[in-house]
Structures are given as C-alpha cells and as structure tokens.
Image (tube, rainbow, N blue to C red):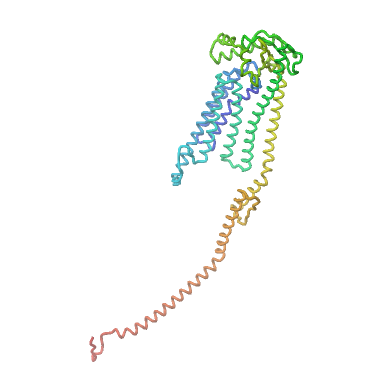
Amino acid sequence: KPASYLIAIYTAFSNVFLLYFAYHFPRNYRRRESRLTVTIFTIAGIIVYALYVYNTYSEPVVYNFETQFFEFQKPAAARPLSLVLILSSLWTLIVLTRKSISIEREYRRNLRESGNAANRPFGVFRLHSKEARALRAFAAAVLAMTLFSSSYVLYTTNRISWADFQLILTSATIVQFFVYTIIYLNNSPQPTTFMVKLVGVSLVTVLLVLGIVNRFTYEGNESRYDQRRLAELHEIREEVEESDYSTMPPAVRYIAKRPAAGGPFVENYEIMFLKTDHISADSLASNDEYMESRYLSHQQIRDNRSIDEILSDLRKIDYSEYFTSPEYQGRHPRRLYRSLTPDDSSTYFIRYVIKAGDSLYEIGYDYAPYLMSVHTTAGRMIYFMLLTTVILFVLFPFFYHGGLVNPLNRLLAGVTKVNEGEYDVEVEVQVEDEIGYLSHSFNTMVESIRDARARLQDYADHLEEKVKDRTAELRKTLEQVQNLKIQQDGDYFLTSLLIDPLGRTAVESPDLTVEA
C-alpha cells in the first residue's frame, strides 16, 4: 500500500507542477491567476488524495497476475483522482494555448509598428514568435497527455481493466517525458551548451527505444514460457487420457479434474496428481468460490445487473466448448492463475486447462520460478539501461570531443576574441565538414575585417601628412591665383591710362574746336 500511495501522490500533484511551469514559461503574464489556480488544484489534490487513502486503507490486498504487483483499490475509489487529473490537464492546455495566442499577437503588433511585417505571411497556424511556437509544442504534448490520461477515467468507470490501464499509463509516461525533454531542449530560454542538447536528446531517445525494446523483450519472454508449457501439455494430454501420471514433467505441481459443465467456477474437484502441500480439492473449490464472488461484484458494477442474472448467465457457459474451440486449440493456450492465500506467494500457481475425454483437467505450475525468470529479465533490462545512461553521460562527450566539441570550441574561442577586439585570429580547420566550412568562412571574414582595419589605420597614421600636403597644394594654388590677380590689376591700370585720353570728347582750350 505505501508504494501505491506514493503513486497516488504523483497522480494528485504532478499536474500542479506542470501548471506552474505553463504559467511561468517563458514568463508569467498572469501572476494573480497563476497563484489562485495553482492553490486551487493543490487543495483539490490534497482533498482527493486524503479521500483516496480513506476509501482504500481497509481494503484487502490482492495480487494482480496480469500486472504482476499487488493491488487493493476498487476502480471507484480512484475516480476523484482521475477527475482532478483530467481537469488539471485541460486547464494546463488552456493556459498554454491562450499564452501562445497572446504572445503571437503581441509579436505581430510589434512587427506592424516597426514596419517589418510587409514580407511576412500570416495565418492562423503560422506562428512567427519563437516563444509562441514553443508554447504551441508544449500544448500539443499536453493534449496528447490528456488523451492518455482519459484512460484513468475509463478505468475508474469500469470501461477498461487495470492491466490495460497500466499498459497505457506506462507507455504514455515514457513518451510524455521524451516529448517534454525534446521540446524544452529545443526551446529553452536559458543558456545551454551544444553538448547538453546533444547528450540530452541522445539520452531520452535511447531510453525511449530501450523502453520499446524492453516491452518486446518481456513479450518474448512470455511467449517462450508459454511455448515450453505448450510442448508439455501435448504430452500431458496423452498421459491423462491413458490415466498414466507416473511420468509427469518435473515442473508440474498438480493435476485436478473437474466437470466441463457448470461454468468457469465449480465446487467439485478431484486431485489426480499432486507434488505440493498447498493444493487440495477443498482449497481449489474454496478458491473458485472466492474468484466467483469477485467476478460477480465486478460484473454487477460494470453491467448494472443483479447478481442472480449474472450468475444465471455464468452457469450457462460450457467450458468444454471453449477449450475445444479453434481459438484455444491454437499455438498459445490461455494462461490462468490461482492465488490460494494472498499473503503467501508460495500458494500462487500458473494453470492451464485441457480437455481430455468428457472432463477438464487443470495442470498447475509454481508461480515463483516464472516470477524469478521475469525478475531476472527485468533486472538485466535495468542494468542495461543504467549502463547505457552512464555511457551516454560519460563516454558520449569523449567520443564527440575530437570531431565535434574541439572544433566548436576553437570556433567559439575565435568568435570571443573577435568580440573582444582581437583580429589576429585564425581558426584551425582539421576536418572538412560543416564546422570546417564555418571555420573557413570565419577566417575569411576576419581577414577582410583585418584588411579593412589596416587601411583605416594607415589613413589614421598618415592623416597629418596628407593634410599638410593638401594644405601646401592649396596654398600654392592660392599664391598663383593671387599673382594672377596682381598681374591682372596692373594690366587693367595700364589699359585705363591708355583709354582715358582717347575717351575724352571735350577740349578745354578756347582756341581749339573738336568736331565729332
């Protein structure tokens, strides 16, 4: 129960932190609303968690063979948790979508005011703001998570089984963390290094692939176990038909005979072969009675029918037809389980039912060896995933150091020196790849800047001499102009002296008359 209560804490409060992130990424525009809604969902989480603990504290613990762990809750007990989970997911989706639209509108308004919106195509789904695109990506991830979370509601309303819900939940959680990590690394407003993104993306991608591989590995382990038992069942059927139980496979713990009629749960068993102290005809009948009561309770809640109606339909089931059907006669028979004493794992059995003659025979195997094989496989998966994580964190930077990190660091060091005013920089190019092309382009750019600065420095160093030369040339030109002006003034004076007598028309002497 403590482990389940810890999982319930995650269910009740995980979306509170997600909602807090939605309000504050990249910055909080609605501080009052964020404080109010986060407080409301926190209080709601506390209430539904306390209600969940109260409703399940006294429930008996039962081992679920399909999910392979203990459970104690009834679906209805987790219904408030599922509702809070769905509501908080929907509100987080609303916050992200609303903020994305608001930031994009502000960005477009600023573009129009600055006059830079003429060549930018706008549309409903075409976002130009980097922050708006990041929020839209997170909103899409939350939408997918909300759809997966709806399986919790389906479970609490008896629409799907606990095993199906656990499969959906675990698969969705792996994909959810992968998507969140990728989106955040690609859109993080905080400064990050290229190596962090490279190792982070590689890590979550590899872990996602390993999660899928682990699932197929587990299914393969299940299939191999059933195939081994199937090979034994063919031999056992022949020996049962001959009533020879002397050469049973060593893994078989018991063989019990029961009538084919009467439904899946019967009251009369006959032990035909026994190699365990935990099995008897009475214990099998008592266990059938217990499983029948659980089945009736579950069906009554799901179908909303009376127990008498469900029991009447159950008694009509002919197990002989089921076990002789083409579906059952296929390669993989259906594996069934028994738990005689929930607190004692030594009373857990795997059982297969075969038809021989007019009766059904239940062949039982110890559950512990099977569980140990699953544990061994799961342990190897865990060790492999931990080893992969260590390799990615420790060795990946080393692997990328020579061909990727060092060239990037050299290029970054060159850019830093240029920003500081040092232009005697040349980045060494070791590999002719994309980084090598950038390094060549950077060297060419720095060389052009260096030449331009040299010309400017030359102009600055010889500016005084050039000014003196230009001043001397101007002074000489002015002197020449002055000399020409003086010469011109002299010529004008002489000309005026010559013209003045000739221009006179009146004679002052009384003895001389001039006729025009």
| Residue extending farthest right | 246
Look at the picture and state if 340 lies above or below 421.
above
User: Where residue 398 sits: x, y (%)?
Assistant: 69, 43
Residue 167 falls in which quadrant of the image?
top right
In front: 67, or 320?
Answer: 320
User: Where residue 511 sits: x, y (%)?
Assistant: 23, 92
Residue 305 falls in which quadrant of the image?
top right
In front: 106, or 295?
Answer: 295
Locate the C terminus and report the quarter of the image it occupies: bottom left
Look at the picture and state if 43 lies above or below 269.
below
Locate the N terminus and report the quarter of the image it occupies: top right
In front: 276, or 465?
Answer: 276
User: Where residue 312 sits: x, y (%)?
Assistant: 57, 9
Q: Is residue 12 visible?
A: yes
Q: Is residue 114 visible?
A: no
Residue 74 falls in which quadrant of the image?
top right
User: Where residue 190 sits: x, y (%)?
Assistant: 58, 41
In front: 412, or 49?
Answer: 412
Look at the picture and state if 510 lies above or below 79.
below
Q: Is residue 132 left or right of residue 209?
A: left
Residue at 64% in and 39% down:
199
Q: How many numbered marks have been drawn onto this rendered protein structure?
A: 0
